[in-house]
Image: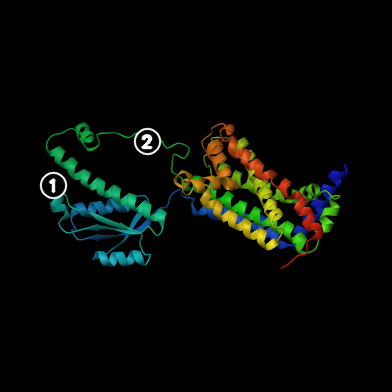
C-alpha cells in the first residue's frame, strides 16, 4: 500500500507540472491531434487526383485530340495547358506549373495508320516522386490505348470478332487481386505509418524532457525521495500520467482512422489495442533509456529526435527494408517504429495471427524494459549531478 501511495503522490505531482508547463499540453495533446487531422485530411481522397499536366500537340488531328481527352479523363491527371513547343512545356515543369507533358510530334497519325511506328514522348518530373510516378502511369496508359485503338480498327476491318481481337491485343488476361488494401488507398497505408511515427517522436521528446527538467530545475532529489529512494517507483509514478494521456491519444487516433474513416483492419480491434499499448510503452522506455545513457536534457533530446526521424526511413514502409544494405537491415532492429510497422502489417492490415510477428513483439517489450538497465545511473544523476546548460 505504501508503494501505491507513493506512486499516486508522484502522479499527482506530475499532473501539477502539466498545469504549470504548457509545453506538455501542446506536445502531448494539441500537436498530435493536429498531426492526425492534417495527414488524414491531406490523403482523404485515397490517391492524388487531377495533378496538372500539359500537352504539346503538333499533329492536331481527331485521333490525337482523342488521346488528349483520354489523358484529361484519367483519375490522377488533368490537362491544364497546351504549349506550342516542347521547350516551353519543359520550362513550365521547371517552374512547377505542371508535373509533366505529353508530346505528340507532327505526322503521328499518318505514321500510325501506315504502321510506321511513330514516337510519342512524355516528360515528367521526379522531383516530387509520387506525382511524377502517377503522371507517368497515366501517360503510358493513354499511349498504349492509342496504339491499341488503331490495331483494333484494323482487325475489325479484316472481319475479326471482338473475342479474337481481344485475344490478339491481350494474349494473357490479368485477374488482379490487391490484398489488404484493395483500393490502393494512400490514406490507409501512409497515414497508419506516418502518424504513429510522429506520435512516437513526441513521446521520445516529452519523455526525455520530463525527466531532464527534474535535473534542470534541481528537483531530482525530491523525485527520488518521494519514491522512497526506489528509482523504479519514482519513474512509474512520474510517467503514469504520461502513459494515460498517450494511450488516450493513440486509442482516439485508432478509433478515428479505423472506425470513422474505415481504413482496412482485418486483424480486429484487440490487435489494434495491443499494438497501441506496446507502441506507447516501448517509446517511453526508449526515451527513459536515452536519458539514462546520457543524463543531459540537451543531449538526450537531441538523440531522441534523431532516432525518431531516422525511424521514418528505417521502418521499411516508404522504402522496402529488403532493398537496403545488410548493415542497415540489422540496424533497423534498433528502431521501435520498425517493429510497430511489422506488427501492424502482419496482425492488423493482413489479419494473420499476431504471434507470426512475435520477434517484433518481443523487441517492443525489450524497448519497454530498457529503463531497468539505466535505472541506477538515473538515480545517481538525480542525487548528485549538477545541471550544466
Rendered-image quadrant of the C terminus: bottom right
In the depicted structure, whether residue 274 falls above or below residue 246: above
Quick check: can you spot residue 98? Answer: yes
Residue 294 position within the rendered picture, expressed as x and y whole percent measured from the top left = 69, 57
Q: Is residue 176 left or right of residue 352?
A: left
Q: Sequence-wise, which precedes: disc 1 or disc 2?
A: 1
- Disc 1 crowd rating (10 Å Cα; few below 14, some 14-19, many 20+) is few
Identify which residue is drawn at 70% across, 61% down. 297
For the point 56% across and 51% down, which residue is it?
Answer: 311
**CA gap, disc 1 and disc 2:** 32 Å
Res 385 quadrant in image: bottom right
Identify the secondary structure beneath mark 2.
loop
Residue at image location 25% in from the left, 64% down from the top: 86
Locate residue 64 relative to residue 100 in the image: left or right.
left
Front residue (pair 359, 201)? 359
Badge 2 is on which residue?
176
| Residue identifier under label 1 | 115
Amino acid at each position: 500500500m505504501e508503494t501505491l501511495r507513493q506512486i499516486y503522490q508522484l502522479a499527482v505531482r506530475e499532473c501539477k507540472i502539466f498545469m504549470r508547463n504548457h509545453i506538455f499540453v501542446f506536445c502531448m495533446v494539441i500537436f498530435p491531434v493536429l498531426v492526425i487531422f492534417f495527414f488524414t485530411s491531406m490523403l482523404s481522397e485515397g490517391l492524388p487526383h487531377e495533378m496538372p499536366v500539359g500537352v504539346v500537340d503538333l499533329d492536331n488531328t481527331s485521333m490525337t485530340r482523342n488521346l488528349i481527352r483520354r489523358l484529361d479523363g484519367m483519375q490522377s491527371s488533368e490537362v491544364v495547358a497546351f504549349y506550342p513547343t516542347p521547350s516551353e512545356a519543359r520550362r513550365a515543369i521547371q517552374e512547377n506549373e505542371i508535373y509533366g507533358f505529353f508530346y505528340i510530334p507532327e505526322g503521328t497519325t499518318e505514321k500510325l495508320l501506315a504502321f510506321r511506328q511513330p514516337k510519342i514522348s512524355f516528360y515528367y518530373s521526379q522531383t516530387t516522386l509520387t506525382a511524377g510516378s502517377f503522371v507517368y502511369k497515366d501517360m503510358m496508359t493513354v499511349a498504349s490505348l492509342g496504339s491499341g485503338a488503331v490495331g483494333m480498327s484494323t482487325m475489325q476491318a479484316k472481319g475479326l470478332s471482338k473475342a479474337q481481337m481481344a485475344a490478339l491485343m491481350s494474349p494473357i488476361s490479368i485477374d488482379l487481386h490487391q490484398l489488404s488494401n484493395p483500393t490502393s488507398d494512400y490514406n490507409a497505408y501512409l497515414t497508419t505509418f506516418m502518424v504513429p511515427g510522429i506520435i512516437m517522436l513526441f513521446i521520445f521528446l516529452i519523455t526525455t524532457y520530463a525527466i531532464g527538467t527534474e535535473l534542470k530545475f534541481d528537483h531530482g532529489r525530491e523525485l527520488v525521495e518521494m519514491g522512497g529512494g526506489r528509482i523504479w517507483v519514482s519513474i512509474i509514478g512520474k510517467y503514469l500520467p504520461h502513459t494515460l494521456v498517450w494511450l488516450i491519444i493513440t486509442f482516439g487516433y485508432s478509433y478515428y482512422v479505423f472506425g470513422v474513416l474505415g481504413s482496412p483492419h482485418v486483424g480486429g480491434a484487440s490487435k489494434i489495442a495491443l499494438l497501441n499499448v506496446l507502441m506507447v510503452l516501448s517509446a517511453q522506455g526508449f526515451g527513459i533509456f536515452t536519458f539514462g545513457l546520457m543524463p543531459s536534457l540537451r543531449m538526450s533530446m537531441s538523440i531522441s529526435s534523431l532516432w525518431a526521424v531516422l525511424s521514418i526511413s528505417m521502418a521499411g514502409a516508404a522504402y522496402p527494408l529488403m532493398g537496403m544494405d545488410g548493415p542497415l537491415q540489422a540496424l533497423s532492429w534498433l528502431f521501435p517504429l520498425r517493429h510497430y510497422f511489422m506488427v501492424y502489417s502482419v496482425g492488423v492490415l493482413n489479419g494473420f495471427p499476431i504471434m507470426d510477428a512475435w520477434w517484433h513483439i518481443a523487441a517492443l517489450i525489450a524497448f519497454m524494459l530498457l529503463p531497468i538497465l539505466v535505472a541506477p545511473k538515473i538515480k545517481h544523476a538525480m542525487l548528485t549531478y549538477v545541471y550544466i546548460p
